[in-house]
Image (cartoon, rainbow, N blue to C red):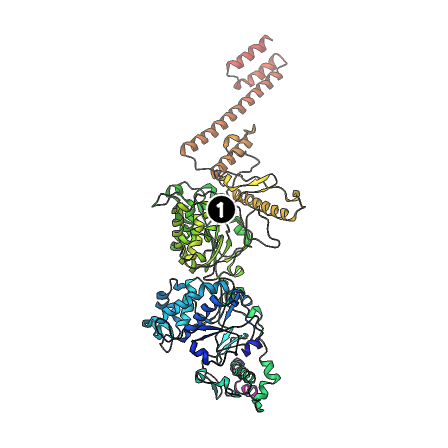
Amino acid sequence: MRSFVKSGQPGPITRLLSCTDEEKKGYKGMHLAPTFVVPSMSRHPITGDWYPAINKPAGVVHWLKHSKDAKNVDWVVILDADMTIRGPIVPWELGAEKGRPFAAYYGYLRGCDNILAQLHSKHPELCDKVGGLLAMHMDDLQALAPKWLSKTEEVREDKAHWSTNITGDIYEKGWISEMYGYSFGAAEVGLRHKITNDLMIYPGYIPAQGIEPILLHYGLPFAVGNWSFSKLKHHEDNIVYNCNRLFPEPPYPREVNMMEPDPQKRRALFLSTECINTLNEGLLLQHAANGCPKPKWSKYLSFLKSKTFADLTKPKVLPSTSVKTDETRLKQVVDEPGRPRPKIHTVFSTECIPYFDWQTIGLMHSFHLSGQPGNITRLLSCTDEDLKKYKGHDLAPTHYVPSMSRHPLTGDWYPAINKPAAVLHWLNHADIDAEFIVILDADMIMRGPITPWEFNAARGRPVSTPYEYLIGCDNELAKLHTSHPEACDKVGGVIIMHIDDLRKFAMLWLHKTEEVRADKEHYATNITGDIYSSGWISEMYGYSFGAAELNLRHIVNKDILIYPGYVPEPGVKYRVFHYGLEFTVGNWSFDKAKWRDTDVANKCWAKFPDPPDPSMLDKTDENTLQRDLLSIECGRKLNEALLLHHKRRKCPNPDSISNSDTINDVAISRKFGRLKERLSDKIKNNTQISSPLTEKDSLFNTLRVWVIALWIISGCGFLVVMSLLFSSHKGKGVKGKTHRSKRKSSSGFVTSGRDRYFRNLEVSS
């Protein structure tokens, strides 16, 4: 209580005092702290087992049920009596969240990793080795407390597994059953902790470099030089009521400085002396409050009242950067210059149809512009027949997956199931070296990187975006399809998940999708939120219910994704467009569903209608303007991606051919050289963008070229001959010898009846 007052801890404090009626009658310490009396369970009312440690969860349960204070607070900090507080413990400043309590690390709880957790928790993988310092939201404590008590009873009764090699209890007496009760109870309700190993320390231990612990837990013996202290030696001590009696005084600061040259070890010694000095200061003040006579002067009493001691025990206010949980350590490591960041792999699922090809083109183009680290893989679900005629193999790095659009057992047609099925297939068949997986949908455009270190994803704590229309998380649908409906998160779209979590989760995602899809009795809109009442969003519920089964609670971030057509929040840099819904800007609109049957990817220069020019937008309303600018950006990015795609496919110059892209559209030139050049280019390009020609078609095209060429050559030859004849006729103006000699000189060219006709004509003239 003395350290609580000195620390500046906000809010009131309550001692949960467990007493039998008989003990309460003779108890003298009711005034020591604000107190809530709890019926003692030291002797179990049913089994008769003597185990005082069970009073901790039993006291919390009783306080929650019967105390008015419990109904007026949002956050609770739970401490042990054998602690001194060095500074304020503010849950949200430590990083605690609703659904994510903050706790100190108890590494010796080895039962979390062995048969003990498997026997006493449905979710042994969620068991956190924590205790001592606990800071959590009241709603979480309400859910946890009954399990904490029941699991304590359960572990306490399991005497067959009390051995040190299973529990870590050196006494093998089941004494730490309450600690396991807490960890197993938290695992049952899906509470994963933010864990620190720095802010609580046992006196005698060396603190972490640069860290000021805010709790000293003197549960173990500790020493400074020849001086030592053990709370067990004072178990029956009546020191609080023995006037002016204190614990043995520890060495003074000057002596401590002379004992140890190493600064870190010296810090540990100072923490040990501070702990016992704070206890003695509290005793002095309590003795005075009890009416004890003023103690005689001594050097030690003078020190406890000195400015030196006051300065040493001033409240330690922690900067937020000094709080290092498992997650902040990860973030510190990956953000540290020169330190490698965890590898990321991005995946998205599609099918072997043109509808997904243009979406793939858009996503891949934006991926390369976004700065997203790591590789990307398209999970392509196809039947064998579809794969034979599929043209889009070159659109993205691809992992091929057997299609489940038609369910192999039920025959149900549900293409959306390919997403979890493809992820599961990829995990089982691909060589994956990434630590975090980012899962997207094909109908997305990336605008920036999506990384676990920026959005605080961690093992056991995925990140996703809100899907508020999944109302089934709040009603009977969740109760029917998951054993932990309270852990159902309304999320989807963008997912950032640790590979270990994804490997545990993927099969459940698929199975829960099948389960919800088969539950046709609950397709109704008022149950699922599906406006079509067709079970089309079963895969989304499969994700949420599968995660709930594993108590995978998400960090829900609304700043990652936006639907074009929605008004953006000011200042938010959204990383993804999800164009799953129709959006409009003035008279222009885009709805992906209207392009389901159009092969935009394989038709040269095909694109979507261009969105309006941003300069033409109405700027009177800022929200509308920002909304429309994002919509235009999305539409432009899709067309930009298609343009580059057509160029990569070496489509012919769009100015020289029509959109029908057929050879018949070529205008035949009167100039043979130009015709040949254009014809050759046309055939070449047409071959590149269309399906391969058969041998018959190839032969026909070749013959056609030669026939046209021969026709042109013949025509040119005829024109040359006629030109010569007309020239000869024009030059005949003198009769007689000269003319005859000229006529003979040209006789080599006169062989046809037409020429004889011209000669007769000349003679008669």
Q: Could you tell me what secondary structure mostly forms the magenta stretch? A: helix
Alpha-carbon neighbours of circle 1 within 10 Å: few (<14), some, or many (≥20)?
A: many
Q: Is 152 within the magenta? A: no
One can see residue 732 in this view? yes
Q: Position of residue 104 (x, y in %)?
A: 48, 71
Q: Is 264 within the magenta? A: yes
Label 1: which residue?
360
Q: Which range is magenta?
A: 253-265
Q: Nearer the viewer, residue 342 or 191?
A: 191
One can see residue 432 in this view? no
Give the farthest residue toward the right: 620
| Image: 295 above or below 672 | below
| The quadrant where residue 9 appears | bottom right
| Image: 62 above or below 442 | below
Q: Nearer the viewer, residue 91 or 206?
A: 91
For the point 46% across and 82% down, the residue is: 231
Kind of residue at disc 1 = Thr
Q: How many marks?
A: 1
For the point 44% across and 51% down, the residue is: 541
